[in-house]
Image (cartoon, rainbow, N blue to C red):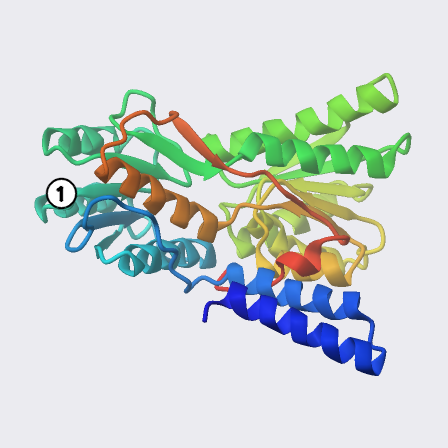
Amino acid sequence: MNFKHLATVFNYRIGIIALILGINLMSCVEELNTVQANTNNSDAAGELIESKIDLTGKKIGYCTPSLNAPYYQALFQSIKSTTEANGMQFLSADGQNDITKQVAAVEDLITKGIDVLLLNPLDPDALVGATKAAKVANIPVFIIDSAINPSADFVTIIQSNNLANGELAGEWLAKKFGRSNMNIALLSGNAGNPVGRTRKQGLLQGITEEQLRSLGYINLNIKTQAYTNWSYAGGLKAMEDILVAHPDINVVITESDVCVLGAIKAIAQAGKTDDILIVAAADGQKEAIKYIMETDFYGCTAMNSPVQIGRKAIKHAVEYLNGKREFSKTTYTPPLLITKENAAKYYNPNALF
């Protein structure tokens, strides 16, 4: 019996009990639906994908830039479990956060006779040659999560809608502050990263467009920007420096939850959790969602689900193996803003990310 059928049966039985005991039926159903939502977000659940051909023995190769982060681990697990749930063989390679090693890792996957290459590039330019080598070997390439130089040979880029997510977070912030002044610190990942740049663009567009709609003018005061290298330690150090140089900061906007989770420690140590509001353009990391649920200083984040991206990547790979050739150059997962109002629905304490 699958979970959806079990949920239907359980809802029916709860209803009968409710009629007898006078229990609030809606609250019971809502609680079950929350459990179901969390189960559906499980990292380990492989999704079955419709296929006209026998997928048994097909080889899916995935090269990650690193496994030294919960996000990369969750993405890896999503791709692996979905591949294996559909009877295919999963081959993986780790770039170990070193572009030379990632290039070599991709070349190694190609020599192993994979049928599809899923590639999460550490650098948007350095892997172009590897995609062309895959094409020579008749291996379709799907770019996962990040971006690549348009000159590369690839079928589609599969990622969250970074621009739309950033806009949603920016709009929320502008509505929250209204006519009140914002003294903003921007925490970024690293210089030149195309995904971070798009998220930042979305944040700024969301703020300014909402201000123009509701106020008729723009009041955008970014006091400083700092790079965190997409790390907890980097966020902590950046925020410590910012609070010394700009003690009047009352808003922190960031390209990713990971950039700001370390910054929270610096904000707390400075006794400013009541004075600073945090808004993230991505990712929906479980620690961030927990802060949103339990505090008032973490206002919102947007969904960049490694589970959804991994499943969508395998779905498109299966479609390609079944003969489909027309794909958009970029494929997005749906944009979604997470706030205190809906955070519990997306919080899964057992998730990898």
Whole-percent x, y for residue 2 in the image: 46, 67
In-front residue for pair 308/285 = 308
- Where, by quadrant of the figure, is residue 218 drawn? top right
Image: 64 above or below 132: below
Residue at image coords 40%, 59%: 73
Query: Does residue 219 show up?
Result: no
Q: Is 41 on the left-hand or right-hand side of 316?
A: right
**Visible residue check, residue 157:** yes
The amino acid at mark 1 is: Ile
* Above-or-below relation of 308 to 150: below
Q: In the rendered image, which residue does mark 1 sit on?
A: 110
Dividing the picture into quarters, in which one does residue 126 lie?
Answer: top left
Quarter of the figure with residue 180: top right
Residue 67: percent from left, percent from top = 36, 57
- 116 sits to left or right of 288: left
In the rendered image of this protein, does residue 350 appear above or below residue 212?
below
Badge 1 crowding class, 10 Å Cα cut-off, few under 14, some 14 to 19, many 20 or more, is many
* Local secondary structure at mark 1: helix
Q: Nearer the viewer, residue 94 or 227?
A: 94
Q: Quadrant of the N terminus?
A: bottom left
Q: Residue furthest bottom?
A: 21
